[in-house]
Image (tube, rainbow, N blue to C red):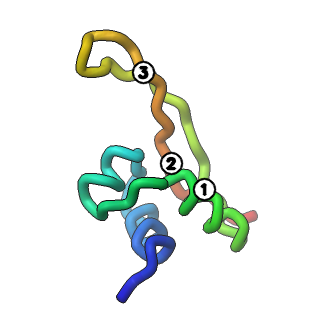
Amino acid sequence: METQEEIILKHLKRSSITQLKAYERYGIFRLAAVVYKLRQKGHVILSEEKMVKNRTGGKSRIAVYRLGGKK
């Protein structure tokens, strides 16, 4: 069975990921914690803040994570 770290790292090798995508696809609630652990292990993961419209029509800030270059 794959760990959450392995699942997210495999996904990041293909494309970027957000908390919502991590929850919908993999059932991972705490993406930031998984990203933190991967960074502690030496993986370069970049995060970009993005403003999106929420369900009430207001704006919310989300993080989009993607794999970076070598450390």
Of the image marks 1 and 3, the number of the one nearer the N terminus: 1
Which residue does the numbered mark 3 point to in the structure image? 60
Could you tell me which secondary element the residue under label 2 belongs to? strand
Q: Residue furthest top?
A: 58
Image quarter for residue 33?
bottom right
Horizontal and vertical percent position of residue 5: 50, 72
Q: Residue at x 55, y 36 (%)?
A: 48
Q: Which residue is mark 2?
A: 65
In the figure, 43 relative to 51: above or below?
A: below
Extreme residue in the right direction: 71
**Residue bearing the label numbered 1:** 45
Q: Is residue 29 left or right of residue 41?
A: left
Q: Position of residue 43 (x, y in %)?
A: 65, 67
Q: Which of disc 1 and disc 2 is earlier in sequence? A: 1
Q: CA distance from mark 3 to mark 2?
A: 16 Å
Give the distance between the C-alpha atoms of the residues marked 2 and 1, in whole angstroms. Answer: 7 Å
- Amino acid at pointer 1: Ile
Q: Position of residue 40 (x, y in %)?
A: 72, 67
Q: As displayed, is residue 53 above or below residue 64?
A: above
Tell me the tag on residue 66.
none
Q: Amino acid at mark 2?
A: Tyr
Residue 70, given in percent of the width and then of the height, sits at 69, 65
What residue sits 53% from the left and 31% below the top?
49
Q: Are marks 2 and 1 in contact (CB under 8 Å)?
A: yes
